[in-house]
């Protein structure tokens, strides 16, 4: 299946089957999110993979009655960092140094530039910036899943505070950005047979 065929194939699943995603498939999806682009490469987000039926049931209470949260093979929670600042850059500089074998002293200009870029934003702007980076990862995650014929349903129609409490995210300096049930569509999910609704290219694209 080519890229465009995969995008036409995918839809927001309403009902999942009981089939479970294989560990190797799950790993590939997580790699797609991990390898995603992000502003300055800082990746200010974290993924939580919920496979416990009991925990999924707890989260269902804060999912506005959307049963797919409990039905799916795995529930992926995309969470943004909340302590955005110098520590965010320090973490990246350390990783950069280790990965490329460069002394941190040689990265001083990069360090200062990135910290300055974050410092000009206020706290709410930094938080919104972090959520935006998580959304980029979510987009790649969805596309990778479609290419693998794994079904998804990205969701923001949830009680974010409830998710944060159940998962103990505040104590980890994280907050929920979006959640994504994954698995395989139920044969009786009527949504799979409905036409995809998208605007035409001329409504979406302008050539200048």
Image (cartoon, rainbow, N blue to C red):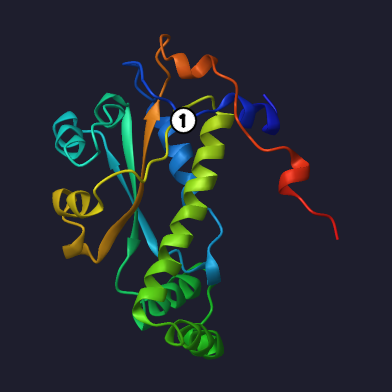
Q: Residues within 10 Å of mark 1 (few under 14, many from 20)?
A: some
Determine the residue positioned at 50% across, 72% down.
Answer: 96
Which residue: 68% across, 26% down? Answer: 5
Residue 186's quadrant in the figure? top left
Q: Is residue 43 above or below residue 66?
A: below
Q: Residue at x 38, y 60 (%)?
A: 45
Task: Find residue 49 and report its image quarter.
Answer: top left
Q: Is residue 19 above or below residue 166?
A: above
Residue annotated with mark 1: 12
- Expressed as whole percent of the image width and height from the top left, the position of residue 129 reads 45, 68
Locate residue 204 relative to residue 141 in the image: left or right: right
Residue farthest toward the top in the current orientation of the protein = 188
Between 30 and 145, the one nearer to me in the picture? 145
Report helix, strand or loop for mark 1. Answer: loop
Instruction: Tally the numbered discs.
Output: 1
Q: Position of residue 156 (x, y in %)?
A: 36, 46
Which sits in the foreground, 184 or 63? 63
**Depicted 126 relative to depicted 73: above or below:** below
What percent of the width, then of the height, locates residue 80? 35, 61
Q: Position of residue 37 (x, y in %)?
A: 56, 59
Give the camera-side residue of 65 and 166: 65
Picture quarter with the C terminus = bottom right
Residue sitting at 39 percent across and 79 percent down?
90
Image side of residue 2 versus residue 49, left or right: right
Which quadrant is home to the N terminus? top right
Q: Residue furthest right?
A: 208
């Amino acid at each position: 299946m080519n890229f465009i065929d995969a995008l036409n194939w995918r839809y927001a699943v309403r009902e999942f089957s009981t089939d479970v995603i294989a560990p190797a498939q799950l790993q590939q999806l997580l790699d797609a999110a991990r390898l995603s682009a992000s502003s300055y490469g800082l990746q200010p987000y974290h993924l939580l993979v919920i496979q416990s039926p009991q925990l999924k049931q707890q989260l269902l209470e804060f999912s506005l009655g959307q049963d797919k949260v409990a039905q799916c093979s795995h529930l992926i929670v995309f969470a943004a960092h909340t302590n955005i600042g110098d520590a965010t850059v320090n973490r990246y500089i350390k990783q950069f140094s280790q990965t490329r074998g460069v002394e941190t002293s040689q990265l001083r200009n990069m360090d200062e530039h990135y910290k300055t870029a974050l410092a000009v934003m206020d706290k709410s702007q930094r938080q919104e910036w972090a959520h935006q980076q998580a959304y980029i990862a979510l987009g790649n995650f969805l596309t990778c899943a479609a290419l693998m014929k794994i079904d998804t349903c990205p969701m923001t129609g949830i009680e974010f505070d409830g998710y944060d409490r159940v998962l103990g995210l505040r104590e980890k300096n994280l907050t929920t950005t979006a959640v994504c049930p994954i698995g395989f569509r139920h044969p009786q999910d009527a949504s799979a047979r409905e036409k995809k609704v998208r605007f035409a290219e001329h409504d979406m694209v302008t050539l200048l």
